[in-house]
Image (cartoon, grey):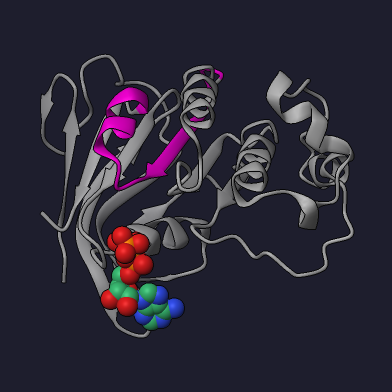
Amino acid sequence: MARATVQHPEGTGNGPAPGERGTAPLVTAEEAVVGYERPVLGPLSFRVRPGDVVGVWGPNGAGKSTLLKAIAGAARVHRGRLERPPDLRLAYQAQRPARLAEMPVKGRELLAVMQADDRRPPERLRPWLEQRLDRLSGGQLQLLTIWACLASGARLVLLDEPSNNLDPEGIDLLVELLGARAAGEAVLVVSHEAPFLERVATRHLEVGA
Ligand SMILES: Nc1ncnc2c1ncn2[C@@H]1O[C@H](COP(=O)(O)OP(=O)(O)OP(=O)(O)O)[C@@H](O)[C@H]1O
């Protein structure tokens, strides 16, 4: 079973980083072991606080997606604690979001369902608002659903491999969006792309080390 370590920019360790004390965590993991019928990852201890963009990285099969699912309530916590405030709004973008052959829903309607229609989307996304989701390319749908998560008002956003399928301009836009998070919000980002994580993460959680 894989373990994990948390690295703060200011140093390493699992305690709060300088400057983050006194801010109520959005996720608290204490010796948490997560998995499905069987444990796959842990024990891990870390906190996610408002303002964090936590880059989760590690080898294939280490349990990165499982960790996000456990935080979202879609995988089990076998031992220890993995908690978030009960009233916390959370948005989750899966590694391979469901893509049906027929999706007769427009981009604009997706944003409305996600309560992400209050904010004006970036210029690049606007042409897709009037298109059906099943007529968008993989990368276009990926960017639109990421925007829907980030603009939904969720205080905690979980993104699993969000840079998959994206061209360099799409990655630049994603970096810009993640850098523009409101101070009260936090993001966990799973990625295999170290240069991408270096650009977006304020902290790193290494899984399977
Ligand atoms: N629904 C499931 N039920 C049981 N085991 C699962 C399930 N989903 C994943 N696993 C197992 O959990 C382990 C961790 O998988 P997970 O997808 O979390 O890893 P990962 O670090 O995200 O991998 P990758 O980098 O390849 O996406 C793997 O051994 C996988 O086979």
Give the residue drawn at x 48%, y 23%: 172
* 57 vs 194, nearest the viewer: 194
Front residue (pair 129, 154): 129
112 left or right, relative to 168: right
Indicate whether 71 appears above or below 28. below
Q: Residue at x 61, y 39 (%)?
A: 143
**Residue furthest bottom in the image:** 37
State the image coordinates of residue 178 (x, y, percent, origin top left).
Answer: 49, 25
Identified at 51% across, 29% down, the residue is: 174
Query: At 66% across and 42% down in the image, what residue appears?
Result: 140
In terms of image quadrants, where is residue 1? bottom left
Q: Which residues are magenta?
A: 182-200
* Ligand 1 position by quadrant: bottom left
Q: Quadrant of residue 87?
A: top right
Q: Quadrant of the C terminus?
A: bottom left
Relative to 40, is 179 on the left or the right? right
Q: Nearer the viewer, residue 153 or 145?
A: 145
**Whole-percent x and y of residue 52?**
39, 27
Judge from the rendering whether residue 111 lies leftward or rightward of residue 173; answer left or right: right
- Magenta-drawn stretch contains 183: yes
Q: Is residue 88 visible?
A: yes
Q: Position of residue 32 (x, y in %)?
A: 27, 60
Answer above or below: position of 123 versus 185: above
